[in-house]
Amino acid sequence: MQFISKVDDETSIRRICFKGVWPTAPRDFVLCTTWQEQQDGTVFIASMSADDSLCAPQKGYVRGSIQISGYFIEPYSASRAVTVELCSSLSAPALSTAISPGECKVTLVAHTELGGSLPASVINMLSTQAPVKMLAAIGDIVKKAT
């Protein structure tokens, strides 16, 4: 990740790079990301592509576009029941479980255009696996920090 500029205390412009997954080339994205924490501890994080003029395309990368990407993070609350839908893939049936103290529910919404020319099978694989891997990585980071 490359920091480009700070817009305000909750908003920044960044360049994010991803290694190529065979048979694709590496991708990069220029994002404007903002976040807000509510009084109850709920956090909203929203990102979308920023203008390419803020960071010129880099040689060896295909510039992708994020139409919208967002996280809605709800902490456990004894006064409000939060149920989590667990799903390992789009074809698997969802499982429901209640969250416990110290846990949170994370909802991810994303619409990404990978740019370049990719076979539909690769796009489908990346669009279903990447978000799950991203949330698992966030979970690992949180576990290490606590």
Image: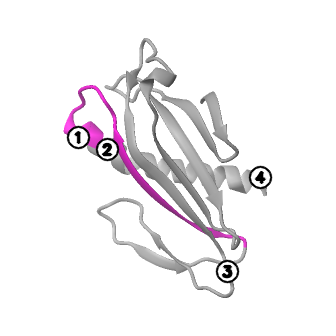
Residue 66 in which image quadrant:
top left
Nearest the eye: 36 or 65: 36
- Residue type at mark 1: give it: Ser
Residue visible at 53% across and 31% down in the picture: 16
For label 3, the SS is loop
Q: Earlier in the sequence, mark 3 or mark 4?
A: 3
**Above or below, comparing residue 78 to residue 73 in the picture:** below
Segment tinted magenta in the rendering:
102-123
Q: CA distance from mark 3 to mark 4?
A: 21 Å
Residue visible at 43% across and 45% down in the picture: 130
Question: Is there CB contact under 8 Å for labels 2 and 1?
Answer: yes
Which disc number belongs to residue 77?
3
| Neighbourhood count class around disc 4 (C-alpha, 10 Å): few under 14, some 14–19, many 20 upward | few
Is residue 110 inside the magenta stretch?
yes
What quarter of the picture does the N terminus occupy? top right
Nearest the eye: 8 or 25: 8
- Name the residue that disc number 4 marks: 145
**Above or below, comparing residue 9 to residue 143 in the picture:** above
Q: Is residue 75 left or right of residue 19?
A: right
Residue 27 visible, this orientation? no
Residue visible at 31% across and 30% down in the picture: 115
**In the image, farthest residue toward the top:** 59
